[in-house]
Amino acid sequence: MSFEPKDLEAVANRRMPFGKFKGRRLSRLPEAYLIWFEEHGFPSGDLGQLMRLALMLHLEGLSGLTDPLERPSPKG
């Protein structure tokens, strides 16, 4: 599994599209939630890959790495 620098920005800004944490940035998902997906299966495609990266950042103590990459939320 390989990641590119643009993936960090995606983890910082992409939102969870479903479930208990719908609307939350992937970088802000709880570690336990990401571990559950690791044990039961991540979604397919880009979302699953980005969730894997978010978990890796949590486990390595690097979750704050994405903070400066967060874009402001749109107002509405």
Image: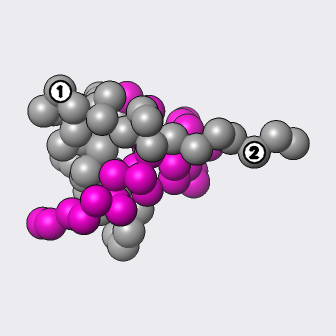
Res. 25 visible in picture = no
In the displayed orientation, state which residue is furthest to the bottom. Answer: 45
Q: Which residue is mark 2?
A: 74
76 to the left or right of 30: right
Which secondary structure is most common in the magenta stretch?
A: loop
Residue type pointed to by label 1: Gly
Residue type pointed to by label 2: Pro
Which quarter of the figure has residue 74? top right
Q: Which residue is mark 1?
A: 61
Residue nearest the viewer, comparing 20 with 8: 8
Question: In terms of sequence position, does the residue under pointer 2 or pointer 1 come before the other?
Answer: 1
Q: Residue at x 68, y 41 (%)?
A: 73
Label 2 sits on a secondary structure element that is loop
Magenta stretch: residue 22 in it?
yes
71 to the left or right of 32: right
Q: Residue at x 32, y 28 (%)?
A: 64
Boundaries of the magenta span = 1-30
Residue nearest the viewer, comparing 28 with 7: 7
How far from the left and from the top, in percent, is residue 76? 87, 42
The numbered mark at residue 7 is: none
